[in-house]
Amino acid sequence: MYDLQTIVSRNDTAASKVDKSCIKSILNVNCFDDSIPMWVADMDFACAPAILEALHKRVDKAIFGYTSRTADYFDSIIDWYSRRHNMQIDPSWLVFNPGTVIALRNCLRAFTKEGDGVIIQPPVYYPFQAQILETNRTVINNNLIKDDNNHYSIDFEDFEKKCKDPNTKIFIYCNPHNPIGQIWPPADTKRLLDICAKHDVIIFSDEIHCDLIRASATFTSALNIDSTAKLIVATAVTKTFNVAGLQITNLVISDATMREQLNAYTGKIDISPFASAATIAAYNESENWVLAVNEALDANLDYMDTFIKNKLPRLKFVKPEGTYLTWIDFSDYNIENQTLLEKIANEAHLILESGTMFGQSGTGFIRMNIACPKSIVIEALDRLYKVFGE
Ligand SMILES: Cc1ncc(COP(=O)(O)O)c(C=O)c1O
């Protein structure tokens, strides 16, 4: 029903993912004309037809003035999270921000002061650390524990120790977790929430990958866990429906005082007419597109799993439960991470991300985004085989 196998050109779209100077400045690797970019976390699939149609219709209105968030807009979000995740959200709890990273930065500034401690769980999405440092807050690492099978778990003892420090004010949770791809079980979330409640630490729960999960996986939002913790849940139509450039994030904050504090910090934030139209069409009319995307991701991951086991056995790869990001362990090759990234860029012509960008505990790993037509995954793995095959 949906064409997720045709390669869609990004030419003349100013997409960061294919921008050679962006690739050079962020990753410091060469990008050739035939390089395949599998780094930035957006998908190479064409947008859902209902979203395209809604945007075309909106363009045809010919006026793009200041835009209100309508009842339709709120209902589309509330219905989606109720239907898909059994989350009961009151419309007054939704706080719009133009992007999740921006929302996080605003929360850091609204709820903490310079020098305050913010916990993250490396290896983790690197803009978290960047926001903490750029706002002059203090990064507190609660490193994930990795076992011999590359399965990660949370170090609760260390977490509680760090929450006990009165300087610690916010914990940034990532569930599903980028880059390791694990979905934290509700019991883990409950334990974290309880520790945060006990030590008065706010949880910023980034759940924006929650719709892109494997057929066998289940996801429970922190919102559905019984707790007295001060909670902010980040939801984003942009990740699920591949419209990141439209910059739409809705925070769910049930605590009115916290909402007021955040709103007082940011002031009024307007939504763009395109963001509004896309959100409504996505949540109301594009559920089947997400199901199709998840099927395509499952197929790509199955292919990759078999390929690596059969042809690249020195790599270790655990299929992610959530996200479309794969976390591949190259440590058996014992190559320093940036050298490895450059080798892959120069010899395989693949643009990937170094594990160390996500923290020192990412040493030996490479992150590869497989949200693309299967032919691209096949080509990318063939290229890796040419460089790393025995
Ligand atoms: C966990 C996580 N949070 C936030 C973001 C960025 O979201 P936004 O584009 O809404 O800032 C990403 C993008 O990859 C992500 O993986």
Image (tube, grey):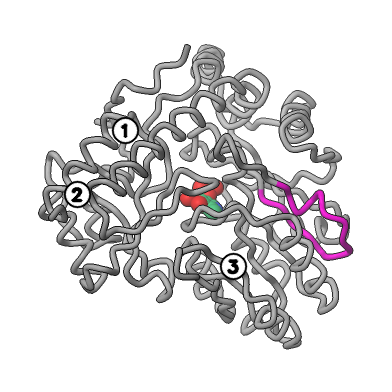
Q: Secondary structure at mark 2?
A: helix
For label 3, the residue is: 153
Q: CA distance from mark 2 to mark 1?
A: 28 Å
Q: Judge whether residue 101 can be spotted in this image.
A: no
Q: Position of residue 5 (x, y in %)?
A: 34, 22
> Which region of the structure is painted magenta?
220-234
Q: Secondary structure at mark 3?
A: strand
Measuring 15% from the left and 52% from the top, which residue is drawn there?
389
Q: Position of residue 178 (x, y in %)?
A: 50, 56
Direction from residue 33 to residue 219 in the image, left or right: right
Measuring 62% from the left and 70% from the top, which residue is drawn there?
154
For label 1, the residue is: 13
Q: Judge whether residue 108 can be spotted in this image.
A: yes
Q: Of circles 3 and 1, which is in front?
A: 3
Tell me if mark 1 has few (under 14), some (14-19) or many (20+) residues whose alpha carbon lies within 10 angstroms of its own.
Answer: few
Q: CA distance from mark 3 to mark 1?
A: 40 Å
Q: Position of residue 337 (x, y in %)?
A: 26, 70
Question: Does residue 11 lie above or below 189 as drawn?
Answer: above
Is 252 one of the magenta-colored residues?
no
Q: CA distance from mark 2 to mark 3?
A: 29 Å
- The picture quadrant where one finds residue 383 is top left
For label 2, the residue is: 384
